[in-house]
Image (cartoon, helix red, strand yellow):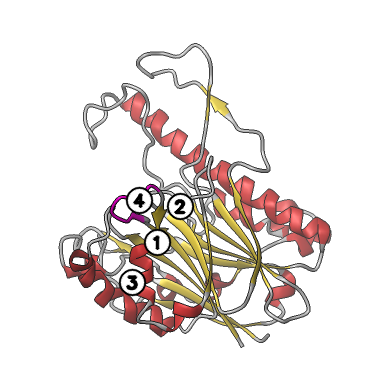
Amino acid sequence: MLRVATYNMESFGDDRFDPDRLAPRLKALRPRLSELKADILCLQEVNAQKRQGAQAREFLALEALLSGTEYREYEIGHSTRPNAALPADRHNLMVLSRYPIVDQKVLFQTHLQVPVWRPAHADPYTEAPQPITFDRPILQVEIDIGARNTLHVFVVHLRAPIAAPIPGGKLSVSSWRSVPAWAEGYFLSALKRTAQALDLRLAVDKVFEIDPAGMILVAGDFNASGDASALRLACADPEDTGNPSLHHRQLIQVDALLPPDARNTIIHKGRGQTLDHILVSPSLYETFSSVSVFNSGLADEVLEAETDAKNASFHAAVCAEFNL
C-alpha cells in the first residue's frame, strides 16, 4: 500500500529561526503530520531560515518539526529560487519521500511562452505590455517506488483568487483606489492562476509523450474548486476535450469521489471550500484504493484567525491510498 498526502503548512517558519517562537507550531503540527502516515508527503508554504552569519537559507524550522516524527529519515525534494539553486525565503514547495527521489525539476514557466499584459489603469501607465510572472514555481520529482514505473509527482500552489497588485492601484495594503483598478488586479490574479495551470498541464503531457501509461500524481493547493478553470485545465477531462480517444491523457481528481461535505479543505467565514486536491493519471488510478480529507475539527481561517488554531494550519490535509 502506498499513501500519498498533501498539506498546506500555512507559512510554516519565521524569517529567523527562533525555537521558542516555533514551539507552539511544532506542538500543533507534529500530530497532524503523524496521523497522515504518508509514504510521500507533498507540502506547501514551507519557509526557510538563515543561521546566524550565514548567507544561504536552510529549512531549519522544518528540520525541527521532522525531528519528532517518522519523516525525519525521508528523502527531501524542494523548490528553489528562479535564479539560484537555493530555497526561497517563503512558501517553498516540498516532497518528503520514504522512497528514493531519482530526479527533480523546478518549473518556472517552463512549458509556455510567458504571457504579457498592459493594465489600462496602472499609474504610471506603461506603454509596453509587461510579462506576467508566477508567484511560485511547480515542483516535479521522480520517485522510485519499486513498482512497474517511476512515479512522477508534481507539487503545486497556484495563485489565490485575490486581486494582484497594479502599479498605483491601491491606497493601502487592503484598499483599492478604484473599481477598475481592482477589477484589473482580480483579472491579473485569475490569469496567473490559469496560466500556471496550463504550464502544469503541458508538463504532465511531456511525461505522457514519453510514457503514455506513465504513473503521474499532482498534489497541492490549487486555490480552485469544482469546475474552476484552473482545475479543469489540469484534468483535461474527455467531456471537455470532446475526444474519448484522449482519455489516457486525463488526470482524475480522486478527492472529488468524496461527498461534498467530506472533501472540504478550508473553512472561510463558515463556508467550506475544497482547494487542495490530488489528481492522478489513469494508470495510477487503476491502483487507487481510497482517499481521505483530514478536516475533523478544522478551524475557520477568518473567524478563528486569532486563536490558537493558527499554530497548526487552516488547511486540511488530503491523503490517497494506492495498492502498489
Give, as a three-letter code, the residue at label 2.
Pro
Give, as a three-letter code, the residue at label 3.
Ala
Q: Which residue is at the front of the view, 178 or 217? A: 217
* For discs 3 and 4, the disc positioned in front in the rendered view: 4
The stretch of residues the image draws in magenta is 49-55
Q: CA distance from mark 4 to mark 2?
A: 13 Å
Residue holding disc 1: 59
| Callout 2–callout 1 Cβ contact below 8 Å | yes
Residue holding disc 2: 87
Give, as a three-letter code, the residue at label 1.
Phe
Query: Magenta part mainly helix, strand or loop?
Result: loop
| Callout 4–callout 1 Cβ contact below 8 Å | no
Mark 3 lies on a secondary structure that is helix
> Where residue 54 is drawn, which disc sits there?
4
| Callout 3–callout 4 Cβ contact below 8 Å | no
Q: Which residue is at the front of the view, 46 or 199? A: 46
- Asked if one can make out residue 320 in the rendered structure from this viewpoint, the answer is yes
Residue holding disc 3: 64
Residue at x-position 67% and y-position 39%: 112
Question: Residue 10: x percent and y percent?
Answer: 33, 61
* For discs 4 and 1, the disc positioned in front in the rendered view: 4
- Going from N to C along the chain, the mark reached first, 2 or 1, is 1
- Going from N to C along the chain, the mark reached first, 3 or 2, is 3
Q: CA distance from mark 3 to mark 4?
A: 18 Å
Count every numbered label the image shows and give the total.
Answer: 4
Q: CA distance from mark 3 to mark 2?
A: 17 Å
Residue at x-position 37% and y-position 56%: 47
